[in-house]
């Protein structure tokens, strides 16, 4: 048996594909397909997760190519940001040098994979010809009032010495170094994503090709809440104090008011009172706690009395005002009406500090006694102890109380979102500089578009993090002229979050070499939106939200034809090591795709990867699995060695069934059935079942004569199906049959439905040995089904009616005999 010389053949085809420009994008697509995989973050080489992601995308791109689509299938590099900078610091290298080095290595690996990329459209986010346009995106947001600088309490990572976006805080720790995240008040740049909260939420319904779980994650992250703001008044000053509640029906049950520690009001209330010292101490202590800790349902509820009281606008009752750390300053009004009878946190809090508990919602048929309650009653019920609202079902009460406070001018309907504005400034070196100038006279001034890019200074820059922007110390960078008044002014020293770079890269691919614009409207219109986007689910509430937001902004600004980047998203599963653990550098269990390909070839590695599991599932990688796929490839290679010259047509015709024998008809039917199922499996990205089918067909092909028209028909179709998954092998065999043009320019096999129609067999039906009817069924119908069908036959039914079937004798393909008594 010959061994398939994968090294030679794979590099041969990669070279020819490149030379002939097989994957070059057609500038004027008639039928377009934009296939995109998330670009890679540059750190070292690509890993098995990328290998899987990119191989899946490659199958789809080739499939669409063979279906006659014009394909845009680009790749690029997410090259700015913390991880690259950290890696460079550890190695005492310049971040640019390190990053470009990584790209070189990774690019070579991708080229070894032979993926159908148009390399001509490669983008690298850390190069000026790209980040110039990232700065342009910033300016567009700035112009539209969607980029602003604000003083705020932000997430601060003491490890990375930088601020973090909410999306980068995972269970209270830094997404990158996992240090405990703390809070700091700093002036920072934000993108007003909250202004798009409603639209981001609403159009989730249009994303019909997105996984439900990602949509749910985004929905929860946006966190829309419909409620009521109610104004209490403070006893001493009479000033109004608004609370946000989703349960206005419980207003008569309020027994305290809780203010968030960071709410400026907290300090003001106690100013100059004997409570001041203790309250300030409490505020400082709670600010250091993480949000997770504060809102956790298990930690003990904690707070401090301010000495002040508030008046309930409905009951006129006087209640204590507390500072409480489970109230968050950044949500609602930062003030909560405490209803211990019907809110669990308030209940625990009230029990701890001996605050009264009132029942104002009674469960159906019960009479709750506050002194005996073990927990809050949070379900609907009937309003009680609620003045003129008594007897109203609580769900109706929500509306009634809201209407009442609106009428009295003491409240309003209010929608709140959990989503916060996107913090995009970073006090780090390795990022796109924010194109803003601070002028003493003119204030915040944007850099004019014609002066872009604001270049990141190079050379001897001390970029080790110190808690403030390294660029602030680079005079040549910061000292500039105000673009309005021409006086001396300062550049903003911050750089942008790397997620800004990746929020628009998919647009640049449509026009990657444009020096005058980020992309031309005309070109983007030809390719937008992305037809299929593949990547990891970990980006659900980060990148996948940001790229939708930026798309909407650029749509509003008139640059895009559609306000969603893609209606079809696919999340591939992770690749785990032998022990089921996530692969990472620190664990030392990384598997190098390069080694894998060198040992086994690209195609055998791809096939093994596909064969493990459906693409959305995790796989536990085991290199031994390539043994099976290598054997499979060798068998195919040997099979084709023996083919002789045979007159060929590109579209090998389906032979006439009348000229085929029974065995051939069976195989022909199977092949066509598989073509149909494989197509369905491709669309569902269930490649494992396809590989199994290909293996099955091979066994059949090994048994038949290939040097006749039927044999060739089967072989040609088999190779076309195979080529998506093992493209080098597919191309090699195709050329062996002397087809000339690339197999990927040939047309995709179509199932011939007429061969699928199965022959029918007529069963004789007997009752107690006497022929009572005849029933025709498809040839492959099983015993149970045949019996059922014959019993349902009108004539036979008559003979069986009212009798007990004691036995049913079944003779395959011939007869059913019912024995009745
Ligand atoms: C009184 C009340 C009574 C509440 C009751 C609930 C049950 P969502 O759905 O998340 O919007 N709340 C309001 N602002 C808050 C803040 N800044 N920090 C912590 N909690 C806050 O929940 C809204 C409810 O969360 C509000 O309704 C308020 O408590 C609390 F039986 O008001 B409720
Ligand atoms: Zn100025």
Image: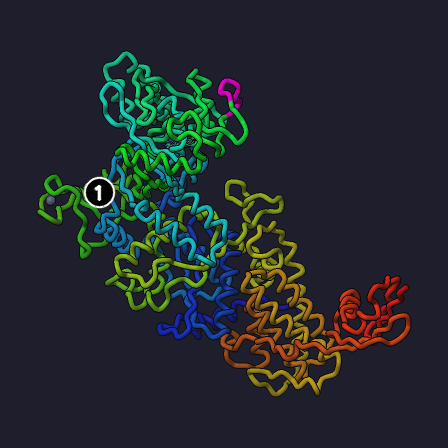
Is residue 53 placed above or below 800 in the rendered structure? above
Q: Nearer the viewer, residue 189 or 255?
A: 255
Which residue: 64% across, 67% down?
A: 633
Residue 488 in percent (x, y) is at 11, 43
> Which portion, as a residue range, is magenta?
369-375
Rate crowding at label 1 as few (under 14), some (14 to 19) or many (20 or more) other CA atoms within 10 Å: many
Q: Quadrant of residue 153?
A: top left
Is residue 269 placed above or below 732 in the rendered structure? above
Residue 351 in percent (x, y) is at 46, 18
- Where does the N terminus fall, quadrant-wise? bottom right
The residue tagged 1 is 492
- Where does the C terminus fall, quadrant-wise? bottom right
Which residue: 40% across, 41% down?
A: 168
Classify the position of ligand 1 by quadrant: top left, top right, bottom left or bottom right. Answer: top left
Q: Quadrant of residue 726?
A: bottom right
Residue 38 in percent (x, y) is at 43, 55
Q: Secondary structure at mark 1?
A: loop
Decide whether residue 44 is among the magenta residues.
no
| Viewer can see residue 211 | yes
Left-right relation of 474 to 681: left
| Viewer can see residue 154 | no
Q: Quadrant of residue 767?
A: bottom right
Left-right relation of 170 to 789: left
């Amino acid at each position: 048996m010959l061994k398939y010389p994968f090294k030679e053949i794979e590099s041969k085809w990669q070279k020819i594909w490149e030379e002939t420009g097989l994957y070059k994008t057609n500038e004027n697509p008639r039928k377009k397909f934009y296939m995109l995989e998330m670009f890679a973050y540059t750190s070292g080489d690509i890993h098995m997760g990328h290998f899987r992601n990119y191989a899946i995308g490659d199958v789809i791109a080739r499939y669409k190519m063979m279906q006659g689509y014009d394909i845009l299938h680009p790749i690029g590099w997410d090259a700015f940001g913390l991880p690259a900078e950290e890696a460079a610091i550890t190695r005492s290298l310049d971040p640019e040098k390190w990053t470009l080095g990584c790209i070189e290595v990774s690019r070579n690996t991708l080229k070894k994979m032979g993926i159908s990329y148009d390399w001509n459209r490669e983008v690298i986010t850390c190069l000026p010809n790209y980040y110039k346009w990232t700065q342009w995106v910033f300016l567009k947001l700035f112009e539209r009032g969607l980029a602003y600088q604000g003083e705020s309490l932000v997430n601060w990572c003491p490890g990375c010495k930088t601020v973090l976006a909410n999306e980068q805080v995972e269970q209270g720790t830094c997404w990158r170094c996992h240090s405990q995240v703390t809070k700091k008040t700093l002036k920072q740049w934000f993108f007003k994503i909250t202004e798009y909260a409603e639209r981001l939420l609403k159009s989730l319904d249009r994303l019909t090709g997105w996984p439900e779980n990602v949509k749910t994650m985004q929905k929860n992250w946006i966190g829309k809440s419909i409620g009521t703001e109610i104004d209490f008044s403070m006893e001493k000053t009479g000033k109004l104090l608004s609370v946000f509640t989703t349960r206005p029906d419980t207003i008569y049950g309020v027994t305290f008011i809780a203010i968030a520690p960071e709410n400026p009001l907290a300090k003001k209330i106690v100013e100059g009172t004997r409570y001041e010292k203790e309250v300030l101490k409490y505020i400082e202590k709670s600010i250091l706690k993480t949000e997770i800790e504060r809102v956790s349902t298990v930690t003990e509820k904690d707070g401090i009395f301010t000495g002040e009281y508030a008046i309930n606008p409905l009951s006129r009752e006087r209640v204590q005002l507390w500072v409480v750390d489970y109230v968050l300053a950044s949500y609602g009004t930062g003030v909560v009406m405490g209803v211990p009878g019907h809110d669990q946190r308030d209940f625990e809090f009230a029990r701890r500090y001996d605050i009264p508990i009132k029942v104002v919602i009674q469960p159906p048929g019960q009479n709750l006694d506050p002194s005996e309650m073990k927990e809050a009653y949070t379900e609907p019920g009937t309003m009680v102890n609620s003045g003129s609202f008594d007897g109203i079902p609580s769900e109706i009460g929500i509306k009634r109380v809201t209407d009442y406070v609106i009428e009295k001018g003491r409240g309003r309907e209010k929608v709140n979102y959990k989503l916060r504005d996107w913090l995009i400034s970073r006090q780090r070196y390795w990022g796109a500089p924010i194109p803003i100038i601070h002028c003493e006279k003119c204030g915040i001034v944007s850099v004019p578009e014609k002066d872009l890019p604001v270049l990141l200074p190079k050379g001897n820059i001390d970029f080790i993090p110190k808690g403030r922007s390294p660029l602030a110390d680079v005079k040549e960078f910061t000292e500039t002229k105000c673009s309005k008044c021409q006086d001396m002014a300062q550049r903003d020293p911050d750089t942008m979050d790397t997620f800004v770079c990746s929020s628009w890269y998919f647009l640049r691919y449509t026009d990657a070499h444009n020096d005058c614009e980020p992309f031309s409207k005309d070109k983007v219109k030809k390719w937008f939106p992305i037809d299929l986007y593949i990547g990891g689910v970990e980006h659900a509430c980060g990148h996948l939200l940001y790229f939708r937001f930026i798309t909407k902004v650029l749509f509003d600004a008139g640059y895009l034809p559609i306000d969603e980047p893609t209606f079809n998203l696919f999340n591939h599963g992770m690749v785990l090591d032998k022990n089921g653990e996530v692969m990472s550098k620190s664990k030392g269990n990384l598997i190098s795709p390069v080694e894998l390909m060198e040992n086994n070839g690209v195609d055998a590695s791809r096939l093994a990867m596909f064969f493990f599991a459906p693409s959305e599932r995790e796989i536990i990688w085991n290199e031994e699995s390539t043994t099976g796929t290598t054997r499979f490839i060798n068998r195919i290679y040997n099979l084709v060695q023996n083919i002789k010259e045979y007159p060929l047509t590109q579209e090998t015709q389906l032979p006439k069934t009348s000229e085929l024998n029974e065995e051939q008809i069976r195989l022909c039917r199977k092949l066509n059935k598989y073509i149909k199922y494989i197509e369905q499996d491709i669309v569902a990205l269930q490649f494992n079942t396809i590989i199994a089918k290909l293996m099955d067909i091979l066994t059949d092909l090994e048994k038949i004569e290939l040097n006749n028209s039927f044999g060739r028909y089967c072989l040609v179709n088999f190779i076309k199906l195979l080529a998506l998954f093992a493209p080098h092998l597919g191309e090699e065999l195709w050329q062996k049959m002397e087809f000339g043009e690339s197999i990927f320019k040939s047309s995709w096999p179509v199932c011939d439905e007429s061969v699928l129609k199965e022959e029918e067999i007529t069963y004789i039906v007997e009752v107690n040995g006497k022929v009572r009817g005849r029933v025709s069924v498809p040839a492959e119908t099983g015993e149970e089904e045949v019996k059922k069908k014959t019993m349902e036959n009108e004539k036979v039914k008559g003979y069986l009616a009212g009798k007990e079937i004691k036995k049913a004798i079944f003779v395959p393909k011939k007869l059913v005999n019912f024995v009745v008594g």
